[in-house]
Image: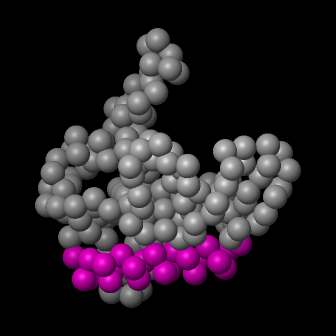
Amino acid sequence: MKLKALILDEKAMNRTLTRISHEIIEKNKGAEDIVLVGIKRRGYPLAKRISENIYKIEKLKLRVESVDISLYRDDLSRLSDQPAIKKSHPIDVEDKKIILVDDVIYTGRTARAAIDAIIHSGRPKLIQLAVLIDRGHRELPIRADYVGKNIPTSRDEIVSVEISEIDKCNSVKIYEV
């Protein structure tokens, strides 16, 4: 793979997450009844960062959960005749404003699976989607409510999000395959 572009460095990523945090507060007229749910793997640490930002702004500590979408994927039968299923812990979502957080939205299938997992846990007041990167190429009618950066990409490119909690650095890069 060949590096095509550095999209966000650490400072730009922090500014972007701060802006998303402000937008969440503004759109929801505060942060009451909000639960941040990070889509495993990189969505969860991003949700924790957004929670920290909202605490700095509103002095309100939000609950941060994670959701494992493996049970709700629509391609399980393609992966294996008998895919291994991991049981996900239920999340209390009743009458809560759920903000799903992920690093990249691409086809929309991951977001759809996460929404299915949330609804399986109960009936939230609403579900909104926050993503660091929107790279386009949707296959489902799903859009993010909060977008850090829109990046036009080709299907032959890879968007790599690195976060310090997992990758020891913070950046968003595009690679050519």
The reply, left or right, for residue 79 in relation to residue 62 is right
Q: Position of residue 17 (x, y in %)?
A: 52, 74
Q: Residue at x 57, y 69 (%)?
A: 149
- Judge whether 60 appears above or below 148 on screen: below
Quarter of the picture containing the N terminus is: top right
The reply, left or right, for residue 21 in relation to residue 97 is right
- Judge whether 87 appears above or below 174 on screen: above
In the picture as drawn, the residue positioned furthest to the top comes out as: 81
Q: Residue at x 46, y 75 (%)?
A: 20
Q: Is residue 67 visible?
A: no
Work out whether residue 165 or residue 175 is closer to the camera in this orientation and state it: 175
Residues drawn in magenta? 9-32
What secondary structure prevails in the magenta region? Answer: helix
Is residue 153 found inside the magenta-colored segment of the image? no
Work out whether residue 151 or residue 17 is closer to the camera in this orientation and state it: 151
Q: Position of residue 49 (x, y in %)?
A: 48, 70
Q: Position of residue 46 (x, y in %)?
A: 50, 64
Q: Which residue is drawn at 54% across and 60% down?
A: 134
- Judge whether 117 appears above or below 146 on screen: above
Q: Can residue 70 be seen in this view?
A: yes
The reply, left or right, for residue 134 in relation to residue 35 is right
Q: Position of residue 56 (x, y in %)?
A: 41, 86
Report the number of discs: 0
Q: Residue at x 26, y 82 (%)?
A: 30
Is residue 23 found inside the magenta-colored segment of the image? yes
Quarter of the picture containing the C terminus is: top right
